[in-house]
Every structure is written in structure tokens, then in C-alpha cells.
Image (spheres, coloured by chain):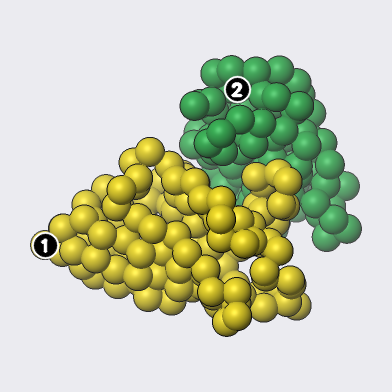
Chain colours: A green, B yellow
Amino acid sequence: ENVLTQSPGTLSLSPGESVTLSCRASQSVTGGYVAWYQQKPGQAPRLLIHGTLSRAGPGVPERFIGHGSGTGFTLTISRLEPEDFAVYYCQQYGSSPPTFGGGTKVEIK
Amino acid sequence: EVQLVESGGGLVKPGGSLRLSCAVSGFRFDNSRMNWVRQAPGGGLEWVASISGSGRDIAYTDSVKGRFTISRDNAKNLLHLQMSSLRAEDTAVYYCAKDMGIWYYFEFWGQGALVTVSS
């Protein structure tokens, strides 16, 4: 299976800062089929990005930007808002089984 | 409005069985592939199983093959996960999730059902 590694595990940032989260795959992800999810405590994950860079509908703010190809993918959050502090997971669906990264926690400094 | 509501979670002893259900509304259930995704306490996400809209195509992650059975009742808009021979490592919140049909990314999620396997 394609193993995804997210780094770093935790980031401590202030509102207004920008951040780039990394997701590395053990094998090239077919078609760039990578999604990103946001999860807050006690809640289900929320789909943010699919197909590397497509936002999942009008409810996802434009400050969430996906990028990447091959084995390296990123999620950039420009100008963090208070509601953006959460755990972020990447997921690949280019090969079976679909797999998730271990997550990056973005916490308030 | 799309809703997925899981039920059936609880505490079970190692080796025991449990059946989860997910009641679905707000979209065409009978032509939607459905999944179970789990999250161990403090841990990451793991896809567990999927079932096509017709129920004919089913897939499992290796660690649950032969122990878990995914099924659906399209007349009642219900998704099920029958879990048997449960192990401590199966302890997790189990989410039902709708994927995008062709692609295995998860558009809608339920709120989750906690399954605890402990003596």
C-alpha cells in the first residue's frame, strides 16, 4: 500500500500567519489523486481539497491551497483564522487501498 | 441536507461481536458507494471497508478480512458493519462515509460510533 507521511506532527502558530503542511507518499500517487481533510476535536473529518488542488465546494475558503505531484504534496493555509486550528490529514486514492497520512496538528501559539 | 447517523457502538470483550449501522438521508443511497473509516483513540484515519451501490462489489482492509462484513439495505437506506472476533486493536471511532463514486475520497461523514474492545 502507499504509505503517506505528514510532517511536522505539530505546528504552533498565531492567527494571521501562513503555513504549509507536507505530505510525502512512499510511491507516486496516480493522477495526483490526493485529498486533504480538516478535523476538529470531537468532530468527523471535513473534506477540504481533492485531486491535489480542487476545493471541495464553495464552503472551503480560498485561503486553503493544495499543490504537488508525484510523491510530494502540500496544503497551504494563508493567513490562519481562529477556526483553522485543527488537525489536517492527507489521503491518497490513486491506488488501493485508499490510505491516510498520520496528520499534522496546527495549534495556537 | 445530507445526513449519516451511526449507531450500535459500545463496549465488547475481546473475541466478541458487534453490529454498527448507519442511517442515511439526503442523497440517492442506492447508487452511492459507501464506506467505513475508523480512527483509533488519539490516532489517524484508516479505511476499513467499502460496498458499491448494488452491494455486489465489496472490499476490506487486510486487517479485518474474514472478521468484518459490510452490507447494506437499500430499501431502508441503511449501511451495516458486522464485526466479529474483535480485538483490542479494533478499538476506534467508526465513521460511515460516502465517497465520490468513481474516486475513493470521502465527501460526507457521519458523526462516528465508538467501539471499545476490552475485558
**Residue B92, picture quadrant:** bottom left
Residue A17 x, y percent position in the rendering? 75, 39
Looking at the image, residue B102 sits to the left or right of residue B38; the answer is right
- Could you say where residue A85 lies in the image, as x and y percent from the top left? 63, 51
> Residue B33: where, in percent of width, then height?
64, 57
Residue at (29%, 52%) from the top-left corner? B67
Q: Is residue A58 left or right of residue A56?
A: right
Which label was assigned to residue B73? none
The one nearer the camera, A109 or B109, is B109
Q: Residue flagged by tag 2: what amino acid is it?
A: Arg
**Mark 1 secondary-structure assignment:** loop
Q: Residue furthest left?
A: B119
Alpha carbon distance from label 2 to label 1: 38 Å
Callout 1 amino acid: Ser
Q: Which residue is mark 1?
A: B119
Would residue A84 be seen by someone viewing this image from the given angle? no
Q: How many marks?
A: 2
Say which residue label 2 marks. A24
The quarter of the image holding the C terminus of chain A is top right
Q: Residue furthest front?
A: B56
